[in-house]
Image (cartoon, helix red, strand yellow):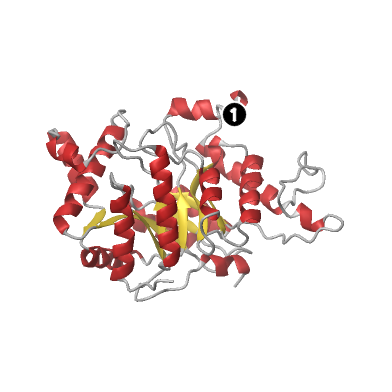
Amino acid sequence: MTATADETRGTTHGTAPTPLSVLDLVTVGAGRTATDALRTSVAIARLAESRGYHRYWVAEHHSMPGIASSSPAVILAHLAAHTTRIRLGSGGVMLPNHAPLVIAEQFGTLEAMAPGRVDLGLGRAPGTDGATAAALRRADRLDEGADDFPQQLAELIRFLDDDFPDGHPYRRIHAVPGPIQATSPGGVQDPHRPPVWLLGSSGFSARLAGSLGLPFAFAHHFSAQNTIPALDLYRESFRPSAALDEPYALIGVSALATDDEKEARRQVKAAVLNMIRLRTGRPGLVPTPEEAEAYEFSPMERDFADSWNANVIHGTADEVRSGLDDLHKRTGADELMITGNAHSGDVRLRSYELIADAYGLPTT
């Protein structure tokens, strides 16, 4: 097994059937600020590290008032300064929004800050609406999108490895920090670079990740009906590579544990109302449970809420553990990455603590 594969695979702690990790959307609740949300992210990252969660990822979103994670690289640098062991990464960077060289430079810098702890997870969706996506891109790249993702990915990997072939127009361009420093006269820097993951919610990235022999992260938390087909496709398509000698798939899971089941229902109802507003073009701060309880859901909104809630594992710590264990058995995922969405940062922090307790994860 390669070094990258060793980093990909986590160590099972306590009685967890598979490594547990954290996906952070840096949510901003009504009456709170982005500063509050980022402080919560630091607190959760430190808790996750002390309780044996394997990795902590931040997801790129834009033009959404209730999600303060528009710049994953900046947030990850901040988290790296407040942690020492836990793996940090993007879940993910939306590659069509960026020039590959910029991402290679950003994550090369992160790797230099936190050697051996950085993951580069990549998605092909914009992470926002079409108008915002256009605003993020140069005028000459407006036609680029998901269909160009394989070419963008190949270019990014070339920059990360510093191995454009002779004659290529980018042959003399180097992503710094990166391998070029280790091969320069007097250079002694470790040429290690962050492992690349592909993210997806359908079969496209599953097949691509498998064919390239890359680890794969599936967004079960908002595309549950596609989870097993996508994982099957990934495993069937997998070809061993320098990164991995066998498939490795994690799934993102929406899960929230509270001290009593009734409180979990209240918190999840607020998160669902937030999602309804987002899906209907009314994004805002995450509402309070009190606002959600007073809200009159239309029949269509209630149907959406029922469908959404069916894929959110919530309740007491034991109930959440049971749901996570069942999901692991059904999917065979190599890792579960938990995203706990709630209005309050304290509720999110408590949820990760309760889940760690339920699995007997150690306190270090």
Q: Is residue 325 above or below residue 349?
A: below
Q: Quadrant of residue 183?
A: bottom right
At 20% from the left and 44% from the top, the residue drawn is 269
Q: Position of residue 282 (x, y in %)?
A: 30, 28
At 32% from the left and 63% from the top, the residue drawn is 353
Q: Is residue 303 above or below residue 334?
A: above
**Residue on which disc 1 sits:** 141
Element assignment for label 1: helix
Q: Is residue 197 left or right of residue 321?
A: right
For the N terminus, the image quarter is: bottom right
Q: Position of residue 257 (x, y in %)?
A: 25, 59
Is 16 in front, or is 29?
29
Residue 191 shows up from this direction: yes
Q: Is residue 189 left or right of residue 101?
A: right
For the C terminus, the image quarter is: bottom left
Q: Position of residue 126 (x, y in %)?
A: 47, 36
Q: Position of residue 219 (x, y in %)?
A: 39, 51
Q: Is residue 251 left or right of residue 166?
A: left
Is 292 in front, or is 161?
292
Q: Is residue 31 above or below residue 120?
A: above
Query: How many numbered dots are placed on residues in this image?
Result: 1
Amino acid type at circle 1 is: Arg
Is 94 in front, or is 25?
25
Residue 201 shows up from this direction: no
Is 253 in front, or is 210?
253
